[in-house]
Amino acid sequence: DIQMTQSPSSLSASVGDRVTITCRASQSISSSLNWYQQKPGNAPKLLIYAASSLQNGVPSRFSGGGSGTDFTLTINSLQPEDFATYYCQQSSTTLTFGGGTKVEI
Amino acid sequence: QLQLQESGPGLVKPSETLSLTCTVSGDSISSSFYYWGWIRQPPGKGLEWIGTTYYGGSTYYNPSLQSRVTISVDTSKNQFSLKLTSVTAADTAVYYCARDYDFWSGPARRFDCWGRGTLVAVSS
């Protein structure tokens, strides 16, 4: 299986900050990388697919980048509703998820 | 608007079979465009893909669970189901069903719509 490693595992930020989360794959996955947001007690919500495509209805302050093994999720001007846990997921082979990054105040 | 809803027992005894159903509303499970998946999340932990199915009968399982998992579709009820045999405490998790969108597209494959999840505890 392809292992997905996210960093950091948690971070503290303030409203208005720019936040970047990194996801690294154990082997090349081209652009087969999705990002999800999960709030406590809720299901994950798709934010970004194919590494950089914004899912319909997701605010434009979210953006994704990268290819091969290294990927980023960037949140520009962090909003109060963005405090959550973020997961990356690869769809190149047997689907696997990263361990998550918790964004806290 | 597409909606998915998981249902099933919230408590299963060790060594028994976990059975869950996902009811799809707002679209037909028989649409040729869509695949349907199960994902689980142990309390306080990350996400694990269990498997994906297509209304025509094709199924794809996580190799780590393949020997214990069966996913099936009931088009007459617009539902798909999960069975996990010989459960242990390690199978305690919130189980989600989701649409596995663009299954054959490669990079664009993603879970774009999720149910709210149901907690299943394995305990005697």
Image: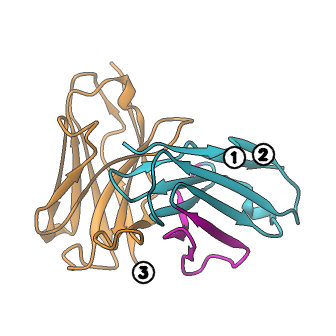
Dividing the image into 4 quarters, which one contains the C terminus of chain B?
A: top left
Q: Which residue is mark 3?
A: B1
Q: In the picture shown, does residue B100 fall above or below B116?
A: below
Q: In the picture shown, does residue B46 fall above or below B26?
A: above
> Would residue A1 appear left or right of B21 to someone viewing this image?
right
Q: Amino acid at mark 3?
A: Gln
Q: Amino acid at mark 2?
A: Leu
The residue stretch that appears in magenta: A41-67
Q: Amino acid at mark 1?
A: Lys
Q: Which residue is mark 2?
A: A11
Q: Check whether the beta carbons of the residues at disc 1 and disc 3 lie within 8 A of each other.
A: no
Q: For numbered disc 2, what is the local secondary structure?
A: strand
The x, y position of residue B114, in whole percent, is 43, 62
Do marks 2 and 1 share a chain? yes
> Would residue B99 appear left or right of A75 to someone viewing this image?
left
Residue at position x 30%, y 69% in the image: B103
Do marks 3 and 2 share a chain? no
B65, B99: nearer the viewer: B65
B96, A21: nearer the viewer: A21
**Circle 3 crowding by C-alpha within 10 Å: few under 14, some 14–19, many from 20:** few
B124, B96: nearer the viewer: B96
Q: Check whether the beta carbons of the residues at disc 2 and disc 1 lie within 8 A of each other.
A: yes
Q: Colour of chain A?
A: cyan
The x, y position of residue A28, in whole percent, is 45, 55
Q: Which residue is mark 1?
A: A102
